[in-house]
Amino acid sequence: MNKPNIVYLMFDQAKASAMSFMGNTEIEMPYCDSLAQKGWVFESAYAAAPICTPSRASVHTGMFPQVHQVTCHQNRAPYNLPQLAEILQDAGYYTAAAGHYEPERNLCRGWHEQSPMHERGPLFESWMAHIRSGRKDVSWSSGAIDVEAKDGNSALLTDRCLRMLDQAENTGKPFFLHMCYDDPHPPYFVPRPYDTMFDPDELTLPETGDLQNLPAWHAIARDQAGIDKATDSDKRKALAIYYGMIRYIDDEMARIHAALEEKGLLENTWIILGSDHGDYTGEKGFFNKSESHYKCLLHVPLIIVPPKDSDEPNPRRIDDLVSCVDIFPTILKMAGVEAPTNQGRDILEWVRKGHTEPLRDVVFAQIGDYHGYIKTSWPSGMPEAGRHKSLTHSIRTSTRVYIQDPDNGDEAYDLRDDPNELHNLTNDITDPFPDLRQQLEQFTIECAALREKLDVVPGDRGFVEGWE
């Protein structure tokens, strides 16, 4: 049988709890819901980092940030770790990427065709129209971009993707197509009619609990985010626009699927749906993101849909923990390619064998070591207090989480009693989960040893103002 095609569709900053197929009844996502009915839904998928660049570097290298050294927004990927597209290209695949896939931070190797939003032209202009929207003094401003949906950035990205699909088909080779939408990345602005698709008054704001229970940096960051200036109406509106941005992408992804179907390609094409990380959208009194390890930032949607009418396992929902680093060896298994050294685990073979044993007992995340010059950066960034000078780590099971933060103090949450991570146990207990802390410390030692073994040469770091 010919090697299969692989289409990897990615949101930017879409959290799992905002997905209709993950149980959110306040949003409608017809296309993604249809994928969930056709494929394998991973209900406990977690990113390796809570912000774009480190998370995407982990997906494309199969390594955690401490190993690939992209630990914050100032890093570029190392030159001497093979990237997913490179490996597939060497294996005979035609590879193409479009959108927000971080080529400017060295995640650009191995693409025969690539169309980043940062190149001058219509994509860049539409992207700039988005990121320049909103107030620069608060994180929660929201509204409409004054264009029709067909002229918005996500629709133009889809147009570009459809041309890439034509080119990929013309090569006669199996293809790997990576479509990276920028929505629902803030600022919370979206073209018409998606700005009015969800009624703010009908939406539920998340529980915030006693914000004084959280680390001291939170209060500083909330001030930098202008949270006190926001009414409940402002917050609901931002949430409604966030949902509108997600629905916009849902409709655009459906156009790609329709093209695959029209070309008769679904019979030999894997489809993967994911996101790089999540968003606060009101949780913990925040909007946007930070260099933090909370569930709302790390828990992401993940669906894998096998080729149509294949012999792969039937559609199912799987609650076992998986990490986004697992996508790396899984895609290579789909392609029949041997994976190089990596920290991921093969989801494909695990599901084929019935996933009777957990793929992972715990998931890890790493972020921080930031020493650059980005300060508070609204409307599209994060609060300065949300960046951390030390590398922080977390370990998470289905019931507990431990966060190691040398600068701000460790955190621990018992998810059985506190699913929204509102009560930090380190305020009450000196060492809440010693077993998790010890396991986390051992993991960081293993990461350091692997980095040394592979002689990873860190990419450039941005110490010069303006580089970032």
Image (cartoon, rainbow, N blue to C red):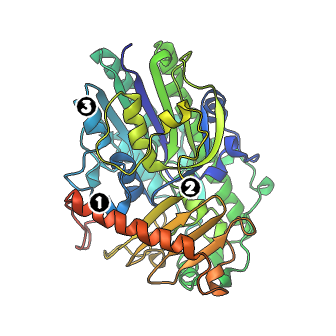
Tell me the distance, in whole angstroms, between the alpha carbons under discs 1 and 3.
25 Å
Q: Is residue 357 above or below residue 48?
A: above
Nearest to N terminus: mark 3 or mark 2: 3
Q: Element at badge 3?
A: helix
**Is the C-beta separation of discs 2 and 1 under 8 Å?**
no
Q: Mark 2 points at which residue?
A: 361
Is residue 162 or residue 145 the one in the foreground? 162
Mark 3 and mark 1 in contact (Cβ < 8 Å)?
Answer: no
**Marks 1 and 3: which is nearer the front?**
1
- Which percent across, then down, holds residue 159? 43, 30
Ranked by sequence position, the earlier of labels 2 and 1 is 2
Q: Label 2 is placed on what type of residue?
A: Asp
* In this rendering, the label closer to the viewer, 3 or 2: 2
Q: Can residue 71 be seen in this view?
A: no
In the rendered structure, which disc, 1 or 3, sits on the residue that comes first in sequence? 3
Relative horizontal placement of residue 44, taking residue 381 as reference (left or right): right
Disc 3 designates what residue? 89
What percent of the width, then of the height, locates residue 243?
A: 64, 49
Q: Residue at 59%, 44% (x, y): give it.
A: 357
Instruction: Indicate the position of residue 116 as horizontal and vertical percent values.
Output: 32, 43
Residue for point 76% across, 46% down = 25
Identified by mark 1, the residue type is Leu
* Marking on residue 337: none
The correct choice, above or below, for 238 with respect to 107 in the image is below
Residue 405 visible at all? yes
Label 1 element class: helix
Give neighbour class at mark 2: few <14, some 14-19, many 20+ (Cα, 10 Å): few
Quarter of the image where the C terminus is located:
bottom left
Q: Distance between the residues labelled 2 and 1?
A: 21 Å
Q: Residues within 10 Å of mark 1 (few under 14, many from 20)?
A: some
Q: Distance between the residues labelled 3 and 2?
A: 33 Å
- Which residue matches tag 1? 450
